[in-house]
């Protein structure tokens, strides 16, 4: 776990996020990095950190962002995610497609 004084709640949150990422196939190093960044952002949003960036406190929460991009619901994947998949599938004309057109082109 990263250096510093996290509360027991934040330590549990870190372990939960890290384990979840590892279960989804992320390497331990990447999982630790993402978990630490997520916990630190939540600490900043809740006034628990001594210093915090403007984006940490004004951006949408990590949980909300994850929910928006979870491939479920009305939002689904971002245009950039769809574009990357279209590039992998070598779909022609992808650069000028809208999000809806990309969704149709990648077949999901």
Image: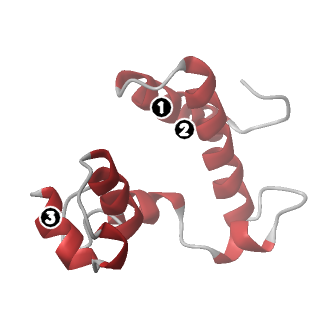
In the rendered image, which residue does mark 3 sit on? 105
Disc nearest the viewer among 3 and 1 = 3
Front in this rendered view, residue 15 or 73: 73
How much space separates mark 2 and mark 3, taking CA atoms?
A: 38 Å
How much space separates mark 3 and mark 1, taking CA atoms?
A: 36 Å
How much space separates mark 2 and mark 1, taking CA atoms?
A: 5 Å
> Which sits earlier in the primary sequence, circle 3 or circle 1?
1
In the rendered image, which residue does mark 1 sit on? 16
Q: Is mark 2 in CB contact (under 8 Å) with mark 1?
A: yes
Label 1 crowd (10 A; few <14 / some 14-19 / many >=20): few
Residue at position x 78%, y 74% from top?
54
For numbered disc 1, what is the local secondary structure?
helix
- From this view, report whether residue 58 is shown above or below residue 13: below
Residue at position x 47%, y 31% from top?
16
From the viewer's perspective, tell me whether residue 43 is left or right of residue 27.
right
Q: Is mark 3 in CB contact (under 8 Å) with mark 1?
A: no
Label 3 crowd (10 A; few <14 / some 14-19 / many >=20): some
Label 2 crowd (10 A; few <14 / some 14-19 / many >=20): some
What color scheme is it?
secondary structure
Res 22 → quadrant: top left
Front in this rendered view, residue 73 or 99: 99
- The x and y percentages for residue 69 are 35, 60
Disc nearest the viewer among 2 and 3 = 3
For numbered disc 2, what is the local secondary structure?
helix
In the rendered image, which residue does mark 2 sit on? 13
- The x and y percentages for residue 25 are 39, 23
Give the residue furthest to the front.
Answer: 92
> Which sits earlier in the primary sequence, circle 2 or circle 3?
2
């Amino acid at each position: 776990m990263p250096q510093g004084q996290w509360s027991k709640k934040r330590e549990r949150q870190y372990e939960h996020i890290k384990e979840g990422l590892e279960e989804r196939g992320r390497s331990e190093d990447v999982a630790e990095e993402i978990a630490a960044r997520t916990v630190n952002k939540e600490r900043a949003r809740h006034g628990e950190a001594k210093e915090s960036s403007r984006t940490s406190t004004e951006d949408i929460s990590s949980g909300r962002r994850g929910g928006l991009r979870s491939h479920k619901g009305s939002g689904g994947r971002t245009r950039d995610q769809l574009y990357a998949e279209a590039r992998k599938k070598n779909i022609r004309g992808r650069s000028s497609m809208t999000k809806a057109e990309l969704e149709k082109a990648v077949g999901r």
